[in-house]
Image: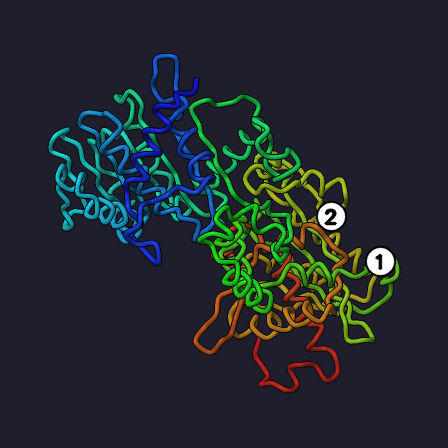
Amino acid sequence: MFNSDLADRAVNFIELLPHTKGEWAGRPFKLQDWQRDDIIRPLFGTVNEDGSRQYRTAYIEIPRKNGKSAIASGIANYLLFADGEPGAEIYGAAFTKEQAGMVFNVARQMVLRTPELLKRSKVIDSSKRIVVPGTDSFYRAIPAEEASAHGFNAHGIIFDELHTQKTRLLWDVLATSTGARRQPLTVAITTAGHDRLSICWEQHCYAIGLLKLRGQIPEDWYKDIPTAVVDDPTFFAYVRAIPEEWDWQDENNWHIANPALGTFRKIEEMRAMAAKAAQLPQLQNTFRRLYLNQWTATETRWLDMGAWDRSAGEVDAEELRGQTCYGGLDLAATTDLAAFLMVFPQADESYKTLAHFWIPADGIEEREIRDRVPYRVWIKQGFVTATPGETINYEAIRAYIERAAARYKLSEVAFDPWGAYEMAQKMDEAGMTVIPVRQNFQNMSAPSKELARLVLDQKLNHGGNPVLRWMADNVVVLEDENQNIRPSKKRSKQRIDGMVALILGLDRAQRNQGESIYDKREVRTLG
């Protein structure tokens, strides 16, 4: 059921509030059409048969500079002053005190500049509270560190930038505190993030699945997120984004993610940032998340994935038979993913690579859900081998490498000595040259930088291996005070074993090539 009076009541209240920042500061908050008709009216006007509000949770995902804080503050003030709830407790939640204070400060300024509200309330800056004595209600900003506190009885919850929440504890504590209220409302308002184990990613996927089911977005968008099977009438979803698989540089897509583009969202600033991101790969994920609401695999991108794809080239395993190559082996943990890469130097100073991966067969469905990648498809395609049991069979890896050594001129195999000495010893006994290389700045920086250069120059041909591409998109690098870099498994949210193996193999290939890049640099000591 839709109650136009309740929808109008919410709109009219919010439009009595003033803007608090920028060129519109002090002017009435005139809602844009999309703010009014797509968010506020359906959110507050859709009711149950008893007249109570139908939606109990709202997930609103829009890029920065589209008025998130103003909408969130307007909703918070409406729930506090005009929702008819005695003893209303409204919480403005965020990960840090500073973030929680951002929406509070906007709501506070709205109250201070609205005499009708100011005379009914008391603003307490020291504790970040707005108190309404007449209804015994309050609005309070709280950070994640207060998640362990008890006694919440929330009527309204505004979660600002949900993607920054490191755990789901504060979300769960507040959401479960609404049970005694007749029509509570939890509003998560956020930009996209990168942590796909977070509460925000969970809510994002839930929202996308419902939007597909409701026919509000096409089913072929967000291909990795399935359409919901059953609708949830209590969940309101509003997502303005372009799917992760779309071209982030195509301006024709930008308006889909930015409803305010052309009004208070300036396209000139977007163009300037896009041009900068095109030149600096480390800014690409920032632009995609904050400007287009694309969820990314990492916080900061190391490699330009467009350049990676352009560098794919043609790699034919049979044509490489008999050619000299250098191997990189990363065993990781026995319960995860292992990788072996061979790097083949070519006459034109480019490189071709062959990659293979291993994974335990037991629990592979759970790993697909955890990592959100199609391991079983990759197994059928021949990119991954599943070894029986709960752990990877290292003997199967050793046998594969020995067969590769017989087929190609496998000159050396570099490996991280952590956990691999036993296999390395057996390979050495079989007549292969194995080189221990610890994954530190000293050993990994030069080949990592060279890999990035080769990708940009389209001289690292990987044949479009989908497993390696996934890992390339996952890599986060660390940088020391001397601008040395190395890939970080701890900082990377998903698997990067193949990229580590590639860097190890590339390092050995270049060290053994006549006048390598290292001839012009200080010789480094491995190990």
Task: Tell me which corner region of the image, top left, top right, bottom left or bottom right, holds residue 335.
Answer: top right
Quarter of the N terminus within the rendering: top left
In the depicted view, which residue is nearer to us: 65 or 387?
65
Q: On the rendered structure, is 236 left or right of 180?
A: right
Q: Residue at x 31, y 51 (%)?
A: 99
Label 2: which secondary element: loop
Q: Residue at x 76, y 69 (%)?
A: 351
Q: Residue at x 14, y 50 (%)?
A: 126
Labelled disc at residue 457: none
Q: State yes or no: discs 2 and 1 in contact (Cβ < 8 Å).
A: no
Q: Amino acid at mark 2?
A: Phe
Q: On the rendered structure, is 316 left or right of 363?
A: right
In the picture of the structure, the residue carrying the numbered disc 2 is 383
In the depicted view, which residue is nearer to us: 268 or 92?
268
Label 1: which secondary element: loop
Residues packed near mark 1 inside 10 Å, few (<14), some (14 to 19) or many (20 plus): few
Q: Amino acid at mark 1?
A: Asp
| Residue 489 placement (x, y as % from top left) | 52, 57
| Residue 433 placement (x, y as % from top left) | 71, 68
In the depicted view, which residue is nearer to us: 416 or 284?
284
In the depicted view, which residue is nearer to us: 243 or 431?
243
In the picture of the structure, the residue carrying the numbered disc 1 is 316
